[in-house]
Image: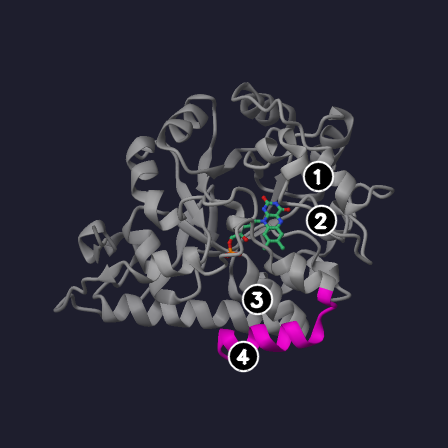
Amino acid sequence: MDFITLRATAQAQLDPVAWSYYQGTADGDPEADQIAWQQIALVPRVMQGLATIDQSLTLGGAHLKTPIMVAATAGHGLANDDGEVATARAAASVGALMVYSSSATVDVTTFGAAAPGPWWAQVYLMRDRRLSDRYVAQAVAAGASALVLTVDLAGSVANAPFRTETQPRMSARPGNFPGLVWEQMSSQIDSDLRPEHIAELAAASGLPVHVKGILHPDDARIAVDAGAAGVIVSNHGRRQASGVVSTAAVLADVVEAVAGRVPVLVDGGVRTGADVLRAIALGATAVGVGRPVLWGLGAAGEPGVTSVLSRLIAEFRQTMAACGAGRLDRIDSTMVRIPR
Ligand code: FNR
């Protein structure tokens, strides 16, 4: 099923409140990130001796079959009764890494026991530290292999009346913080987030901490200096700030600032295998996919997510072949042209 049909199927099947929550953006421009990738033209290499095409990689010590990963998205229980567990099974079946959202519907302990493949746990620093500390301890015990500290919602919480990442009252409840409804979860996010929290989180958990929500190269440098194990270039799927830059436009600058000290990951508007190649050519190590996973889950549950990820993996393989890259390290910045 192509993504347009899949999205329409999901929309027809999901509760309208859940659908608008999944699709929402701050400025009503859901396609901007997607278009930014599309504008980057590929410059294929030929005569490269493509006996095999291999998209596997090692990331944080784990061997992954593909650089395509499931980005952290909240509330999978709004799309399917098995929620995040269905997504984890699908991701594992294709060898993709999953980032589990702290705003999941299935609690992290239940999730960890059921997840067949490697996963990272996303976390927000919460005003009531006991809440985030307890969640992190549970994530460590449940088998998360890294943490993803999301840093781009702190500003919207400081600006509460204009907050765009509002979470409507929905049927399913947050699994890790029972008793809270979604709206209370976002108001718990601490706006006083500072670089030293990265090392504190790493020390408390004993896990590598990837910092998600970086767009400015100076922030990437600051995060790495403060102990980040990786940087995730993300604009939160355009859900946080209105008029925000596309990740495709800033990825190369962040990669340059990080200078190979840690891996740089990216998400936002990645919808095709060609987009994945574009991101890797600009220096990303791995590429996250958000909404299409939710469409797959809403349209057809676990097999729907498997089909979304398999399709992207197959398209990426095809694009690698068409561009003369038999391995990920054969993809470089000479293979893309960014419009001026
Ligand atoms: C998100 N995103 C997100 N990020 C995060 O760090 N923690 C979270 O709980 C969520 N929740 C969430 C819910 C929904 C419904 C969406 C669509 C997104 C952001 C997500 O990780 C990612 O940055 C974007 O979704 C990537 O953009 P695309 O692929 O959706 O265009």
User: How many other residues sit within 10 Å of disc 4, few (<14), some (14-19) or many (≥20)?
Assistant: few
Asked whether 103 or 63 is in front, the reply is 103
* Residue at image location 52% in from the left, 66% down from the top: 94
Q: Which residue is mark 1?
A: 186
Going from N to C along the chain, the mark reached first, 4 or 1, is 4
| 227 shown above or below 215 | above
Going from N to C along the chain, the mark reached first, 1 or 2, is 2
- Determine the image quadrant of residue 218: top left
- Label annotation for residue 10: none
Q: Which residue is mark 2?
A: 167
Going from N to C along the chain, the mark reached first, 2 or 4, is 4
What amino acid is labelled 3 in the image?
Answer: Ser
Where does residue 227 sit, x and y in percent of width and height? Answer: 47, 24
Q: Mark 2 near mark 4, Cβ–Cβ under 8 Å?
A: no
Going from N to C along the chain, the mark reached first, 2 or 3, is 3
* Residue at image location 55% in from the left, 25% down from the top: 198
